[in-house]
Amino acid sequence: MNCMTALKTSRLNLRPFSEGDLDDLSAPMANTDSMRFSLGLFSREQTTGFLEKVRRCDREGLPSQFALVFRPDHKLIG
């Protein structure tokens, strides 16, 4: 069961991550500029692990992270 609430602003949808986010999330997680202030670059395999961890936290009702989707083009941006 997913316990996270989805939030909407005029430009963004903030929602729980889904299994289908892997392809869209892999590129920014491997991008030097996107990950400059984070834990470093993530391979596709590491991104898969990240998504699994976040989704597990969601299912268990633990604090987690939101997927950021740009509303005009429905693109996952983070």
Image (spheres, helix red, strand yellow):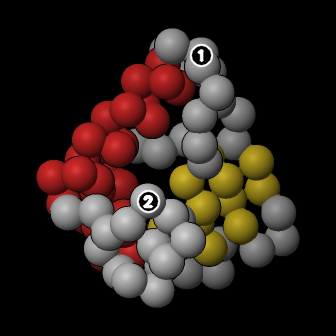
Q: Nearer the viewer, residue 43 or 52?
A: 43
Which mark is first along the chain, 2 or 1?
Answer: 2
Q: Is residue 47 left or right of residue 38?
A: left
Provide the residue designation for mark 1: 61
User: Which residue is drawn at the image coordinates 32% and 35% (left, top)?
Assistant: 52
Q: Position of residue 45 (x, y in %)?
A: 16, 52
Q: Which residue is mark 2?
A: 39
Q: From the top left corner, tell me how far across and down residue 5 is, in percent.
A: 70, 34
- Residue 24 visible in the displayed image: no
Mark 1 or 2, closer to the camera:
2
**Rendered image quadrant of residue 25:** bottom left
Label 2 sits on a secondary structure element that is loop
- 22 versus 77 height, above or below: above
Element type where label 1 sits in the image: loop
Label 2 crowding class (10 Å Cα cut-off): few <14, some 14-19, many 20+?
few
User: Rounded to the nearest whole Å, what is the CA distance between mark 1 and mark 2?
Assistant: 24 Å
Q: Residues within 10 Å of mark 1 (few under 14, many from 20)?
A: few
Q: Residue at x 35, y 81 (%)?
A: 31
Q: Amino acid at mark 1?
A: Gly
Please tell me which residue is depicted at 23% across the width and 51% down the height of the picture: 46
Give the residue displayed 59% in from the left and 16% down from the top. Answer: 61
